[in-house]
Image: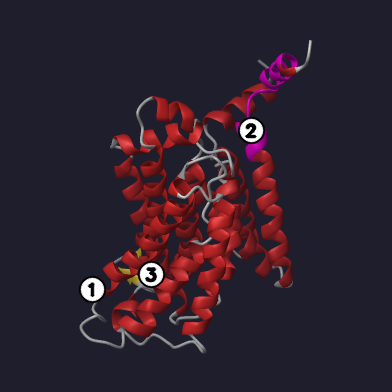
Amino acid sequence: MSKTARLFLLLRTHTFVFALVIAVALFVANLIALPAFVSVGNWDTNWSTFAPFAILAVASTPAVLTGGGGLDLSIAPSANLANIVLVLYLIPHSPWSSWWLAIPVMLAVSTAIGVFNGVLVAVLRYPPVVATVGMLLLLLGLNTRLVPFPVPVLTPWVQGLSGDIGPVPWGLVLIAIPLVLWSLLGLTPFLRTLYLVGGNAATAYSAGVNVAVVKVAAYGIGGFFAGIGALALTALVQTDDPNLGLQYSLIALAAVALGGTPIGMGGRGGVLGSMLGAAVIYLLQNLLIVSHVQNNWLQVVYGAMLIAGAVVGARVTGPPRAARAASRTKAAPA
């Protein structure tokens, strides 16, 4: 087996490796450009800034894993709405301002949106792009309508989320929560069933799997993780800016693609790759800022990363070249 063949085999069996290699290279580049990047004094800031990237990328992953073109473009606006509900409606009204009541409400809001998207896609059979773009536009309009101008957060427990708990930054804790929950799901039959549905929904249905329920649950799980992302957003910006949803929508999807979860295919990849894809975007953004690159180039970079991730994902996770050639030969008319 040639070195190229071994490399492609590694990338096919461990789809996150591509993002891992790029993330390590960018981390080294950041250290060279700005040695203080990893200083203890910057830990809280770095983790708080990275947390929304990472969590919203993880939240976008379950819908993509369902296959059949599955994706949820409304994840970031959903997190933005949960952030607005917290700042505008819960914090000003006791006892809802308490964390033990406010956080469940935020999670319920984002989860409900995810479940609704899942019903549109899996039960009513709307194409995922149509359903979730419609929800994205609806939420962007609703968020702008609810918040004519941003309101700062003055509640101590929310402000504390931008700091640390003992020696551990809160941003790192928030990132760990969806990863731990996903790992716990891996101990149940659900995750294996999700990959089966994403790989081949017809085969899963023939095996007795309720495909619609699995897809709705996947969208709901993504919505739940979006609620955790809403906490990370609030901790970072300390306000209820209605424009955050649009800002993170493309980033989250680009991170999923870079992490080796093939957009539109399903059944391959996972949240670890999405997390590493988010790390690539964050580290590259930081490097561009340190290098004094103009902000308007960042959107160009995000788009390029989305395209690169989609191309690499399709090339690496698709069938081998020999299998594709054999398939075309069989399909050719006699």
Magenta run includes residue 43: no
Q: Is residue 323 left or right of residue 120?
A: right
Q: Are marks 1 and 3 in contact (CB under 8 Å)?
A: no
> What SS does tag 1 mark?
helix
Q: How is the image coloured?
A: secondary structure
Q: Which residue is mark 1?
A: 101
Q: Note whether 137 is above or below 16 in the view shown.
A: below
Residue 324 lies, in percent from the top left, at 69, 22
Q: Which residue is mark 3?
A: 231
Residue 233 lies, in percent from the top left, at 45, 71
Q: Are marks 1 and 2 in contact (CB under 8 Å)?
A: no
> Disc 1 versus disc 3: distance between alpha carbons?
13 Å
Would you identify the image quadrant in which residue 169 lies?
A: bottom left
Q: Residue at x 33, y 65 (%)?
A: 107
Image quarter hosting the N terminus: top right
Give the residues drawn in magenta, as a range: 313-330
> What SS does tag 2 mark?
helix
Three-letter amino acid code of the residue under disc 2: Val
> What SS does tag 3 mark?
helix
